[in-house]
Image (cartoon, grey):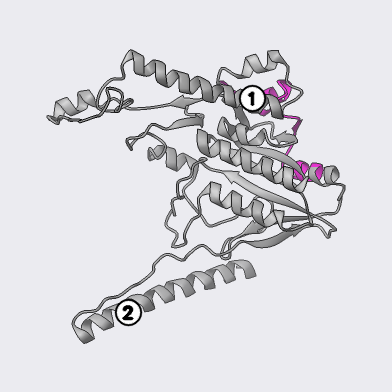
Amino acid sequence: MNGKEMAMKVRKKRRSGLLVLYLAAALFSVSAFGCAFVNVTLYQPALPLQEKVIEGEGPGKVLVMDVSGVLTYDEEKRGGSLKEQVNLVARVKEELGKAAQDNEVKALVLRINTPGGTVSASDLLHHEIMQFKKKRKVKVVACFLGMATSGGYYVASAADHIVAQPTTLTGSIGTIALKFNVQGLMEKVGVEEETVKSGNKKDMWSPFRPATSEEKVIFQRIIDEYQSKFLEVVRAGRKNMTDSDLTTVKDGRVFSGTQAFRLHLVDELGYLNDAVQWARAAAGVPKAQVIIYYRPGTYVDNIYSKSQGEALNWADRLQQGELLPQRPEPRFLYLWLP
């Protein structure tokens, strides 16, 4: 067992020991006094971001920022961790804010591995990155790992240069909205839904009845509007894409990294190290330090390390139906849902 593994093991034992002490104190209070009000915080609040130098001597810094998982405003699942998880949008905003205050940060590398997410979250992430570029006048490069589809590509369109692994999946440029029609199921189990509404369209997209033809037209108009917005973002970010390229990619299909390169969806086939080297060269700092922001207690050793504690990955979240309309509101998605 090396030194890092021993340190992590000691920290885990220390946290477990503190939890045992809290619970023991609570049990003692109850047994000694008959009753007690005990306020025990089992989850550790998120701590401020810290900086880790991965490689390089400087001058200058290149920040590698993780954009992975499903793109939503929702709080990330803890996956068994006792640490508070900050949602992706809030964490990206926090990292960009920290980088904006550091004049040594000369370039930004977006490490993207996501199937996409909600329309709103994807748009906001793109907006925040564009605002950071405008404020700091730095170069941004995106690197696609296993997947950068739909909302992931929307976010990457803010970059000046895109590097994709040959085996990545990207594309899925389009918008989707889903709902379940559970009317038949409810009839089978003898449950009836009753709604009192102020207008005949107040319960549009309700899962308790089929959508009318008129309602489908209304929702299609919204889908078309969001699709137009997506294509505008792609056109603005990908100056070398031809009309023919855009016609090919806008039907929602996915592409391998190699196919995406031929269609000018990406600029280069390579890996994260290649993206870092492009960022250094573009910023004119060939020996820049490569940094990652992380929260204390998170394992950070190389450019592929996560910036915060473990959470359920996007496949788990999709499998659990987290992005499906289990709540009343519809969810418009820039998301690849095979």
- Residue behind mark 1: 232
Residue 216 seen = yes
- Residue behind mark 2: 24
Q: Residues within 10 Å of mark 2 (few under 14, many from 20)?
A: few
Residue drawn at point x = 81 percent, y = 57 percent: 56
Relative image position of residue 301 (x, y in whole percent)? 67, 58
N-term-proximal mark, 2 vs 1:
2
At label 1, the amino acid type is Glu
Quarter of the rendering containing residue 234: top right
Q: Tell me where the magenta segment starts and ends, as one range.
A: 253-278
The image shows residue 221, relative to residue 89, as above or below, that is above
At label 2, the amino acid type is Ala
Contact between marks 2 and 1 (CB within 8 A): the answer is no
Residue lying farthest to the bottom in this orientation: 32
Relative image position of residue 29 (x, y in whole percent)? 26, 82
The image shows residue 330, relative to residue 68, as above or below, that is above
**CA separation in Å, label 2 and label 1:** 59 Å
Relative image position of residue 152 (x, y in whole percent)? 59, 35
Q: Residues within 10 Å of mark 1 (few under 14, many from 20)?
A: few
